[in-house]
Amino acid sequence: MESHEAKETIRRSQQGKGKPIISTEFQGYRLTAVGNRIHWSKKHQTFIDFLGDYIRNILDPHWGNAEIAKPLEERHQILQWYDALCALQKENMKKPAGEIQDMPLNGLVTAYYGLAYNLYLLQHNAELQEYLIRRLKMTDSFYAAYYETFVSAWFILAGFELRIENEQDGGRTHPEFIATRDGQSYSVEAKTRQAKKNHFDVGNQLYAALRIESQLPRVIFIDMNVGADADFEAFGTQALDAIRGREAKLTIMGAAAPPAHVFVTNQPFHLALEQTRLPQVCLVTGFKISDFGEGAQFPSYTDAHKARVKYAALYDVQKAMVAYKIPVTFDGEIPEFAFGEAERRFNIGERIEVAEGRFVTLQSGIVAEAEKKAYLTVIDEAEQGAIWTAELTDAELAAYKAHPETFFGRVVSVGGNIGDPLDLYEFFLNGYKETPRETLLEFMKNAPDIDELKKLPDDELRYRYAEGLTWSATKQAEEN
């Protein structure tokens, strides 16, 4: 069960919280289910191979071939990417044909295969409308539709169910889709600015999104559409000022503008095709929602924590954007292990034969990245413990970096830095979630308001204790 949990943890880290990839091998073919369709091929060794065929088929091979017949500069953007991708693949082919090749993950690869992956996610988890495909094929609407596929993908990966709206219904305006999770539904609208603007004002996009009719809480995505070399400090300041400055005065059809959860992003892949280090930005804030995102202020860590829990599903969308990656394997396994570059040698609980007739069981392990070594705690059949050291290959080290929590075949905690005082507060809150009430009161017996603390419900008592620990820790850190 623990091994299965580790495999599911790895899969979810690659495939998100939506429907898993459904695929199997049968009589030499790789079969992959997408929604109610089955795709098959003898050439799909990786999920990337599948996506390459999938996008060609979903966009229509006849359309693609017609575009390829044009001069390169006159082709649709997708086919210009395809031409550049073929050149990149040819440049990086160092192994015989049919073997799995490595390729740098640059803006071009992410733009082309990211679009393919987003369309797959829509068809597999919700609905892929022909209207969206038509908009993607039209040069004037391509980038807006392209961005919408990313926004849809982030919600799917965050575990939302999507209901795609019929934007061709001229009776009223429609959002891109309705997203539902944990019993709460949101109206989601996506806007993108024209490229190469020399400012970061998002007022026009905010106004256009707020004009969309909806009775549900609103979520608005606005993409800055600027390159990877933009001034991101000015990005955050100007975008936030543009939103805050319109809260009091913006009107829609003569009435005060409705509130909205706003995500201001920058996806520079299509503007930096050859670059491999591409900063993605996601500024989250509230328009007339004071307890959400950047700029929200709280009287206590407990209030901030409750707001984080309240909007947990939306914050998961932000996390999905940050963690967005295109799967390489069908089953979610780390590529280094899946394709034979490395072998899973260390699995907690597994018996290992170290000499003829002599076995030990792996109890735990840690990795020292700088030393390229694993330190293993083992126990033999006589219950004698020992610490062994194992040299790690480059492929094993890469597999560890990809998912350190499951490197030893179980989900184990890997130490990390506390990001901010609220993270520290939640660390304390989780650390004492099973502590009995009597023990907490004993810890707090010298508090001046102990009589009031005794009257609090268990949850509120735990909040107060975590609050006190956090204030004490932050004050000590400031003094040091």
Image (cartoon, rainbow, N blue to C red):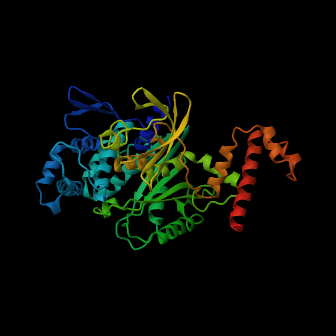
Quadrant of image for the C terminus: bottom right
Residue 235 location in percent, x, y?
Answer: 47, 68
Q: Identify which residue, 130 or 399, lies in the foreground.
A: 399
- Whether residue 457 appears in this view of the structure is yes
Residue ID at (18%, 56%): 83
Residue 235, placed above or below residue 23: below
Residue 153, placed above or below residue 300: above
Residue ID at (26%, 53%): 103
Q: Identify which residue, 112 or 167, lies in the foreground.
A: 112
- Whether residue 215 appears in this view of the structure is no
Residue 443 location in percent, x, y?
Answer: 80, 46
Q: How many marks?
A: 0
Q: Is residue 343 left or right of residue 177?
A: left
Q: Quadrant of residue 335?
A: top left
Q: Identify which residue, 7 or 412, lies in the foreground.
A: 412
Residue ID at (74%, 44%): 462
Q: Quadrant of residue 440?
A: top right
Q: Is residue 429 left or right of residue 322?
A: right
Q: Is residue 49 left or right of residue 267?
A: left
Q: Is residue 221 left or right of residue 97?
A: right
